[in-house]
Image (spheres, rainbow, N blue to C red):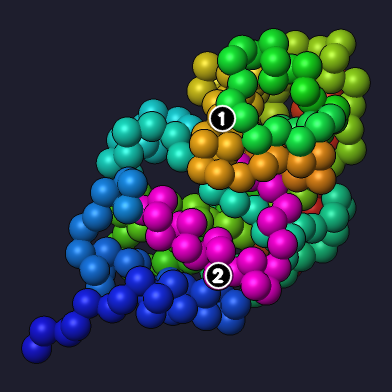
Amino acid sequence: MTHPIPSDADLINALTTSYQNGTTYSPPSHSIGAFDLDRAYELQHAYVARWQARDSISGFKAAVTAPPMQKAFGLPGPVTSVLFAKGARDNAQTIATADYRTLLVETELCYRLKESVSAPLTSVAQARELVARVSPAFELADPGFGAAKFTGEDLVATNIACGGWIEGPAFDWANHNLDTLNAKLTRDGEVLHDAPAGSVMDGQWQALRWLINQTVAKGYTITPDHILLSGAIGAAHPGKPGHYVAEFGAAGRVEFQLNG
């Protein structure tokens, strides 16, 4: 029996309801067929606009920044999405696996700007000059598809695993080479990864500039209240219960307890 293809409004309603209720997404490609990246961003934009009736935008992120992940998802390069206020968690907070559908833990650097930006930047120096604050961070990614098979375009359309984040304390970033910082992630003392921050794209400042330019190109204005996550440093790890600590050397640390 052939099922009718849902309208965009019905599709977005279903995604919004799933996110609100904490239930798994049905990948859009399962109901509307294969679609390209431009169409994926159209759906993401509509999804974000619908969710803004319930929540505010707290920031923006770069995702799928590693070439092996891009190849695995069939994407031509890194992608971007929105972070909602619903996802904010405090440093050293205890959180529950039940609050997520498919939790993945990532280490990142988090940026805030001095002033609002709505036009693309022409240089890395411009990006650096705009930065007011840098801090170690976790992204609490949640693809939300459960066991269903999904495409890279499905991931983009559903706002790229927007689960949450933890912003750590700021550090004296101007006196450090961000690319030489290492993110050492442990869970209950077991090292999960120890990776250089410069492994993200072509380095942290290039990644930040790219994220800013991609975000404003989609019509958003980035304000000093927004956070910017420049991409995962090291691998994404399944969210198993335990005490997670990310140590960034001179940049400090961020941590949380995950209970099952």
What segment carries the magenta color? 40-63
Camera sees residue 35: yes
Q: Residue 235, image x and y in percent?
A: 53, 38
Left or right of 128? Residue 214 is left
User: Looking at the image, which residue sits at the far left?
Assistant: 1
Tell me the SS state at disc 1. Answer: helix
- Whether residue 224 appears in magenta in the rendering, the answer is no
Residue at the image point whose x is 40% and y is 55% from the top: 42
**In the depicted structure, whether residue 137 falls above or below residue 45:** above
**In the depicted structure, whether residue 246 falls above or below residue 48:** above
Tell me the SS state at disc 2. Answer: helix
| Residue tagged 1 | 213
Few, some or many residues within 10 Å of mark 2 (<14, 14–19, 20+): some
Q: Residue 141, image x and y in percent?
A: 58, 54
- Whether residue 60 appears in magenta in the rendering, the answer is yes
Q: Going from the N terminus, do you reach mark 1 or mark 2 first?
A: 2
Left or right of 212? Residue 169 is right
**In the depicted structure, whether residue 112 falls above or below residue 158:** above
Question: Looking at the figure, which quarter contains the N terminus?
Answer: bottom left
**Residue toward you, 216 or 4:** 216
Residue at the image point whose x is 22% and y is 77% from the top: 5
**Residue toward you, 183 or 20:** 20
| Residue tagged 2 | 50
Q: Residue 167, image x and y in percent?
A: 80, 45
